[in-house]
Amino acid sequence: MFTKILIANRGEIAVRVIESARALGVKTVAVYSDADAGAKHVQLADQSVHIGGSAPADSYLRGEVIIRAARDTGAQAIHPGYGFLSENPDFVEAVEAAGLTFIGPSADAIRAMGLKDAAKKLMEEAGVPVVPGYHGKNQDPEHLSGAADTIGYPVLIKAVAGGGGKGMRKVTRPEDFASALDSARGEARTAFGNDAVLIEKYVEKPRHIEVQVFGDGTDAVHLFERDCSLQRRHQKVIEEAPAPGMTQEMREAMGDAAVRAARTIGYKGAGTIEFIVDGSDGLRPDRFWFMEMNTRLQVEHPVTEAITGIDLVEWQLRVAAGEPLPLRQEEITLSGHAFESRLYAEDVPKGFLPATGTLTHLEFPAAARIDSGVRSGDTISPFYDPMIAKVITYGPTRQIALARMTRALEGSQVAGSVTNLSFLAALTRHTGFAAGDVDTGLIERDLETLVEAAAPSARIVAQAALAAAGLMQADATAGFTLWAPLARSIYLVHDGEEIRAVIRVSGAESAEIEIGDETVAARREARGWTFGGRRAAPASRSGSTLTLFDGPGFAFTILNALDRVQEAGGSGNLIEAPMPGLVKAVFVAAGQAVNEGEKLAVLEAMKMEHTLTAARDGTVAEVLAEAGAQVEAGAPLVRLEEQEG
């Protein structure tokens, strides 16, 4: 076994590798960019080396710098993680040329599976079923159109290089083929520098089922399947193992095909054989076809670990160090069910746009496995994948594992960035998905329902208002009597909408909060605050942002009441008290001309003085309060004359 390895990656995968290496007594070296100087993986590793700027091209893709770091620190091997250089055969050869071990497959194996058309031809020769299609070199448009006619519509045009759905077009009619081909080629040329395509039969109810394989260069085994059908624009969202509805006959057929594929290329290490499955008539052994091979560890590998009890990273290190496969095929068993949800910083209503931000609060329930490369206080950088965490749950049955996932997502607390947390929770409650009726089109069909944002209840708004007023702390009850029996208005913004809540004291440890037509009773009890008889939700505040973790979580911006008055706009005629307090001074009189921003009065509230200013140029019509008056929130203080026109 190695004594020290370098991890040529970042984030949750680097943390994951460090954990398994540490359990084996292996020391680790982390590499980091400018943006990752204080990252979690850097702090967990035994050593760390700075390798360049924040952009991947300036750091994590600089193979020669990474190899030099490994040699300088005395590392014997390099673990590539996934992404970045993990499937770069030139990097593998450079690692080995430097006298180091690459923890993964050979450069030849990576090259054999690197181009989809060549890989499909190789798999077809090895007896692995492939989707009917054309994978040849003739890229003449007329020849490709003829191939599509032979295969039969609908067909799928796919770029031979790359992935992520780029260079991919579905064509349902012969007359649409030419324009779709031009579009696919243009996108592929831009994304991959290669506009070659292949043509495949389009599967009507496609399911994406992949098989985890592991080889030692001589032999190979499989660790059962994962279903990755729940996708958004060809990107996986929630994965599970095993696949729902899987029969023993189908499992054996897919497992045998996957192992045959791995043996054909003398595969070493962890890899995944991805199959496209026609689920229109259940899972049948004659309805699955090879799609591609990922020659690395997959993001979703934890679900396989959960159902097999096998640490795949440990196996990677042991096999790379020269050991044979730790278990024979018949010794690998499947038990229970597992799910993985990919929690991202992304704006779901805005088309799942990646988001950034500093995580002011991050906490997960103890019952779930959490693979994460960030902590509270860390920043989601624009330079890398915006993953916050992978949430993994396990249970003896699919129903129990899914129920645990719903609970885990609803119990996850993230503040400081928008996330897809609510979307993920909605998916777990989707009736079709819960029943195991999944295919790659499920999300797109029901997208409108899945992304519908839940509105905060009056109970949640009431808690936010009381917290914004600073009246939920243990020593805050005295403040109730200071302004009793006055009402205090609190202004919050949620999802762009302003909300006004009026707090009215009804006792030393109780209050009533009015939100529109609803009134919520707040009580301090031995177990803590309750609102409408329900216990207060966990909360986090950072600056003017207050997040309540109730279900998907609700973020509120607390408006400074004084600023709200001033920002009401130049058309505002009435200047009101933004909160209950004492009028300390009035600086204007009726008939006096004032300019925008000019002082009108000073209000003393919450032990501070607040200056009220004119929202626009105008003339004072009347002064409605005098110095020394105690006023409630919303009390009129000064009125300006109506503007003409």
Image (cartoon, rainbow, N blue to C red):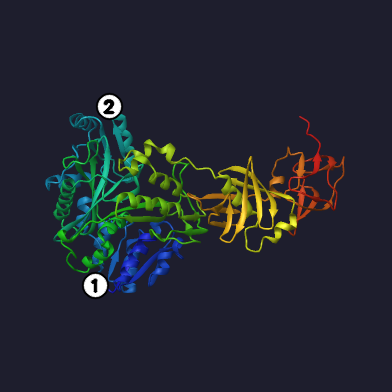
- The residue lying at 43 percent from left, 59 percent from top is 365
Relative to the observer, which residue lies in front, 338 or 395?
395
Relative to the observer, which residue lies in front, 486 or 416?
486
Q: CA distance from mark 2 to mark 1?
A: 57 Å
Kindly state the secondary structure of the residue where label 2 is placed. Answer: loop
For disc 1, the marked residue is 1
Q: Which amino acid type is marked by label 2?
A: Arg
Kindly state the secondary structure of the residue where label 1 is placed. Answer: loop
Residue found at the very far top of the displayed protein: 175
User: Is 120 on the left or on the right of 470, as rendered?
Assistant: left
- The quadrant of the picture occupied by the N terminus is bottom left
Q: Which amino acid type is marked by label 1?
A: Met
**Which label sits in the foreground, 2 or 1?**
1
Can the viewer see residue 102? no
Relative to the observer, which residue lies in front, 537 or 300?
537
For disc 2, the marked residue is 173
Q: Position of residue 558 (x, y in %)?
A: 62, 51
Q: Is residue 186 above or below residue 22?
A: above
What is the number of callouts on the image?
2
Can the viewer see residue 141? yes
User: Is 54 on the left or on the right of 203, as rendered?
Assistant: right
Q: Position of residue 79 (x, y in %)?
A: 30, 64
Dividing the picture into quadrants, the one containing residue 151 is top left
Q: Position of residue 431 (x, y in %)?
A: 36, 40
User: Is 606 on the left or on the right of 334, as rendered?
Assistant: right
Instruction: Work out whether mark 2 precedes mark 1 in sequence or the reverse, and give the earlier one.
Output: 1
Label 1: how many Cα within 10 Å (few below 14, some 14–19, many 20+):
some
